[in-house]
Amino acid sequence: MIDGVSGVLVLAGTPIGQVADAPPRLAAELAAADVVAAEDTRRLRRLVGDLGVEVPGRVVSYFEGNEVARTPGLLEALQAGERVVLVTDAGMPSVSDPGYRLVAAAVQAGIRVTAVPGPSAVLTALAVSGLPVDRFCFEGFLPRKPGERARRLAEVAAETRTLVYFEAPHRTLAALEAMREAFGADRSAAVCRELTKTHEEVRRGPLADLVAWAADGIRGEVTIVVAGASGGPDVAGDPESLRAAVAELEEEGMRRKEAIAAVAVRAGLPKREVYQVVHIDD
């Protein structure tokens, strides 16, 4: 412990596009850090160059591939009284980026954890999407495997809050196609590409239209915002209502398996019960 003062972990938000969006405290924290843990040290060098700041502390890489191995050493530095600043390539550390393990370890060890608030692709996409923003949930990245992706989307098919997803450009079309299957072709959405950057683009419309648009290929960082389910009264638990609700979702383009899962959520019933009702005559 240095001079009897315990260490501090600082989660420092970085620009998602424009360097000018960097919070004023970012440069000061980087200059004062004993250790800077960066998702990509090359990007960090470019960032500090653009900010016109020198980093006298030691710089270590901290990314998905070495998070587990690198966390104990950073925790030791914190316990020794050092100030550790964690930055990722863009946005806030630990939000679909490296950082959660270190934060959890620091909290458990009684280390102070604070943050330098910065730009957020989640909130920026919500703000420009044109969709309801009073209630929303952030779902991060969808699974890469089609089956797992479909199951994840089925779990939120009846969610009435606006949904926000991150996606890689080469998987955006597949993600939109899966959303069309799970939520219906007419569900409103927005694909936000390269937010705050020179080639920023926000494409809005029903999922069917967005699938057609994305077929030509997508480039850049992507955030997808999807309107929540229309809500209305919950599905009644009687067999006739359950079968009608599943049939309605199938007519909208949802596969039966996902429709059953969505109706089960709305009815507050186990999926197996809805499945048995739908397939009673099979």
Image (tube, rainbow, N blue to C red):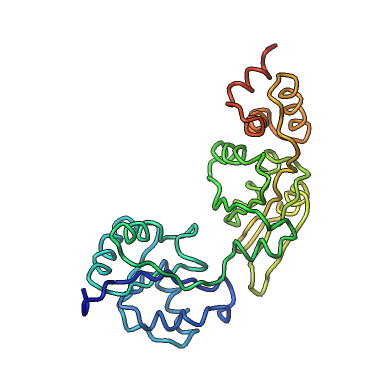
Q: With 88 as the anchor, is 132 left or right in this view?
A: right
Which quadrant of the figure has residue 44?
A: bottom left
Residue sitting at x 66%, y 34%: 266
Relative to 175, does residue 191 appear above or below in the rendering?
Answer: below
Q: With 103 as the anchor, is 52 left or right in this view?
A: right
Relative to 104, does residue 185 appear above or below in the rendering?
Answer: above
Q: Quadrant of the C terminus?
A: top right
Residue sitting at x 42%, y 74%: 42
Relative to 144, does residue 10 appear above or below in the rendering?
Answer: below
Residue sitting at x 21%, y 80%: 3
The residue positioned farthest toward the bottom in the image shown: 52
Relative to 74, does residue 18 appear above or below in the rendering?
Answer: below
Which quadrant of the figure has residue 8?
A: bottom left
The residue lying toward the viewer, choosing from 209 and 157, is: 157
Q: Position of residue 98 (x, y in %)?
A: 42, 60
Which quadrant of the figure has residue 258?
A: top right
Number of numbered discs present? 0
Q: Quadrant of the N terminus?
A: bottom left
Residue sitting at x 46%, y 88%: 52
Q: Position of residue 50 (x, y in %)?
A: 50, 84
Q: Position of residue 231 (x, y in %)?
A: 73, 41
Q: Position of residue 171 (x, y in %)?
A: 60, 51
